[in-house]
């Protein structure tokens, strides 16, 4: 076994990103289906590591000490880019998309429990392979896996949860692009006059050049650091209470408060250019680390019925994005980008959703509405609503 320290892991992550960019630029099918660059590079490295482990019994392990801070910095940048004016403009769309997301949570759990029952599995396994790990991700899966083991006696629940979440993370990054490509063909892509408005292109165009200064960048780093520390303190204060929230949600919330408080008091104007730059760097490195360090061999431990269940969930996600998300959100270009994002966090995580949408907007042009709605719902509301939905299903008499 070869162990890389945090600095070597960071170097590897940057190389994975460069590899992903090269693959997407050189391989037409990846570019055609808008596969995100971190996903292309990260999955290739993960597959190579699987082959090394199987053929030469060599395992490479990464020290991902920087992974969580990078994820939190990304969510801080989302919060710092959300001013009350933009949130007010997108209020109706946020509420509508939240209802669409709730529909998917219900569908995932109904499908999971129903198929598990038909396949002769414990219905709790279907719930675990439903919204808990797919819309919830690794963090929610680990938390509920422990509860299922201790309270309900479901053996290896945590291991199953981690494998299901890994499956979802991989597929969430792969199906978003093809789904959006199919939908974009049905709509009129906005022209230059639509994409050159005054709204800041914060995350839509990650490769766009941005004029910045040394001190404006330092100021933004300081704001992100305040969000990280404030979010950690806020989360610790809520721990054990009925209002307990994940750290990343608290970090995002502190970012929203900080930006709008500074603006209200006219103390400082947060620069969207620096926020987007640091947010995109954090997002890219986080995704590269998350994907290259995936233990894909854990998926091999899943029994065939679980694979069938997860495959059905993937098909259901794609169909839901096409026939529900796209249509309810307006059947236009913004709705197509939203559908790609929904695939990302409906199976994986919010960073995957942003990467999916970036792959689309980098090719076809910005979608300010999509990048306003998805981060707010995918990062801020999803965990709260998902917890309520999970408890609702656990209250059913046959579980």
Image (cartoon, rainbow, N blue to C red):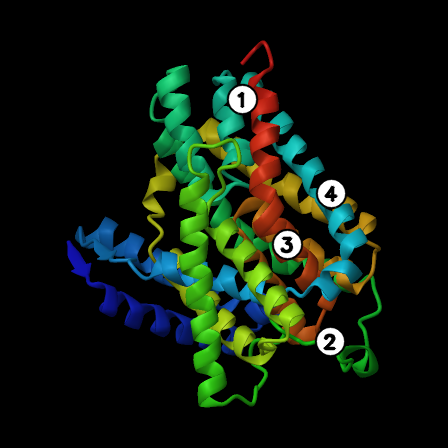
Q: Which mark is residue 199?
A: 2
Q: Which of marks 3 and 2 precedes in the sequence?
A: 2
Above-or-below relation of 138 to 394: below
Q: Position of residue 276 (x, y in %)?
A: 55, 74
Of badges 4 and 3, nearer the viewer stands 3
Does residue 146 appear to the left or right of 244 in the view shown?
left
Q: Which of marks 1 and 2 precedes in the sequence?
A: 1
Q: Is the residue under label 3 in contact with that under label 1 (CB below 8 Å)?
A: no
Of badges 1 and 3, nearer the viewer stands 3
Q: Residue at x 48, y 18 (%)?
A: 121
Above-or-below relation of 249 to 161: below
The residue wearing badge 3 is 376
Q: Is the residue under label 2 in contact with that under label 4 (CB below 8 Å)?
A: no
The residue wearing badge 4 is 100
Q: Position of residue 103 (x, y in %)?
A: 71, 36
The residue wearing badge 1 is 116
Q: Is residue 277 visible?
A: yes
User: Where on the picture, by quarter, is residue 292?
Assistant: bottom left
Q: Secondary structure at mark 2?
A: loop
Q: Position of residue 217 (x, y in %)?
A: 47, 82
Q: Is the residue under label 1 in contact with that under label 2 (CB below 8 Å)?
A: no
Q: Which of marks 3 and 1 precedes in the sequence?
A: 1
């Amino acid at each position: 076994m070869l162990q890389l320290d945090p600095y070597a892991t960071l170097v590897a992550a940057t190389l994975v990103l460069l590899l992903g960019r090269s693959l997407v630029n050189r391989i037409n099918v990846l570019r055609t289906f808008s596969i995100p660059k971190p996903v292309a590079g990260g999955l290739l490295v993960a597959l190579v590591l699987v082959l090394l482990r199987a053929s030469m019994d060599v395992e490479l392990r990464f020290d991902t000490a920087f992974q969580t801070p990078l994820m939190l910095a990304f969510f801080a940048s989302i919060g710092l880019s959300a001013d009350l004016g933009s949130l007010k403009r997108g209020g109706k769309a946020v509420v509508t998309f939240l209802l669409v997301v709730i529909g998917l949570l219900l569908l995932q759990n109904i499908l999971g429990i129903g198929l598990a029952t038909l396949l002769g599995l414990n219905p709790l396994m279907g719930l675990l392979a439903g919204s808990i790990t797919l819309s919830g991700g690794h963090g929610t899966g680990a938390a509920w896996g422990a509860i299922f083991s201790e309270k309900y006696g479901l053996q290896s629940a945590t291991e199953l949860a981690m494998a299901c979440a890994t499956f979802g993370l991989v597929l969430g990054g792969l199906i978003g692009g093809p789904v959006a490509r199919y939908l974009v063909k049905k709509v009129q892509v906005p022209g230059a006059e639509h994409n050159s408005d005054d709204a800041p292109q914060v995350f839509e165009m990650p490769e766009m050049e941005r004029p910045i200064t040394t001190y404006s960048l330092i100021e933004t780093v300081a704001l992100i650091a305040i969000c990280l520390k404030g979010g950690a303190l806020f989360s610790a204060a809520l721990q054990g209470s009925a209002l307990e929230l994940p750290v990343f949600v608290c970090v995002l919330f502190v970012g929203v408060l900080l930006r709008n408080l500074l603006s209200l008091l006219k103390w400082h104007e947060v620069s969207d250019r620096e926020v987007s730059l640091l947010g995109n760097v954090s997002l890219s490195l986080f995704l590269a680390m998350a994907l290259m360090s995936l233990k894909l061999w854990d998926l091999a431990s899943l029994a065939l019925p679980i694979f069938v269940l997860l495959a059905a969930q993937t098909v259901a996600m794609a169909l839901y994005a096409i026939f529900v998300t796209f249509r309810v959100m307006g059947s236009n270009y913004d709705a197509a980008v939203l559908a790609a994002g929904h695939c990302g966090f409906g199976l994986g995580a919010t960073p995957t959703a942003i990467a999916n949408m970036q792959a689309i907007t980098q090719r076809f042009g910005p979608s300010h509405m999509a990048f306003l709605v998805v981060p707010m719902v995918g990062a801020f509301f999803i965990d709260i609503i998902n917890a309520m939905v999970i408890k609702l299903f656990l209250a059913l008499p046959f579980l």
